[in-house]
Image (tube, grey):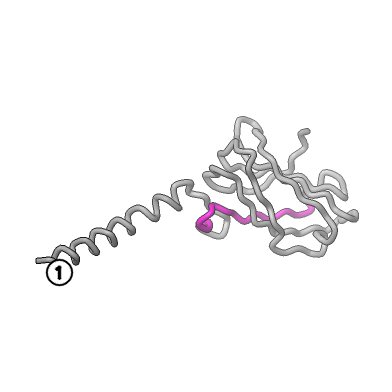
């Protein structure tokens, strides 16, 4: 009888884990252009010369559905424009859409730019395609 109760207990824990873990980690539903995001809700975006406000400053707005000012950005890959540059993130609302503002101050002026970024914004529902941000 004790063995049967133990089996039911183990089975219950497995079913509970299968049901709860996806809810706990997938509830924010963050998606990147390459598929589901990692457990922290990070996404992947690409910034290129179309996001250059001036030749040494890239600014991009990424729709996320979040107003949170808690964000992180790290470089994944670049054409060399990331060397010595600084990157900042913040929350913005553009045309009624909440999202992530990415600002990259480049060390040198670049006409040909390609940066792959891993991004995170708390409570992001997903990560849309970045667009040039011309606001303040």
Quick one: 74 or 60, which is closer to the camera?
74
Residue 104 position, x and y percent, is 79, 49
- Find out whether residue 42 is within the magenta segment: yes
| Residue labelled with disc 1 | 3
Quick one: 51 or 30, which is closer to the camera?
30
What is the residue that sits farthest to the bottom in this orientation? 3
Residue 31 position, x and y percent, is 53, 52
Q: Residue at x 63, y 42 (%)?
A: 70
Quick one: 120 or 6, which is closer to the camera?
6
- Residue 69's image quarter? top right
What is the residue that sits farthest to the front in this orientation? 2
* Quadrant in which the C terminus appears: top right
| Callout 1: SS | helix
Q: Residue at x 64, y 46 (%)?
A: 71
What is the residue that sits farthest to the top in this orientation? 96
- In the rendered picture of this protein, how many numbered marks are placed on residues? 1
Q: Which residues are magenta?
A: 36-49
């Amino acid at each position: 009888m004790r063995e049967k109760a133990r089996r039911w207990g183990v089975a219950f824990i497995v079913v509970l884990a299968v049901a709860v873990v996806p809810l706990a980690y997938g509830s924010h539903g963050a998606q990147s252009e390459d598929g589901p995001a990692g457990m922290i809700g990070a996404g992947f975006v690409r910034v290129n010369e179309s996001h250059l406000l001036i030749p040494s400053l890239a600014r991009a707005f990424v729709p996320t559905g979040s107003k949170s000012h808690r964000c992180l950005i790290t470089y994944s890959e670049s054409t060399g424009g990331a060397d010595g540059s600084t990157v900042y993130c913040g929350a913005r609302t553009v045309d009624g859409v909440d999202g992530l503002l990415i600002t990259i101050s480049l060390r040198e002026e670049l006409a040909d730019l390609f940066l792959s970024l891993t991004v995170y914004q708390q409570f992001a529902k997903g990560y849309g395609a970045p667009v040039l941000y011309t606001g303040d």
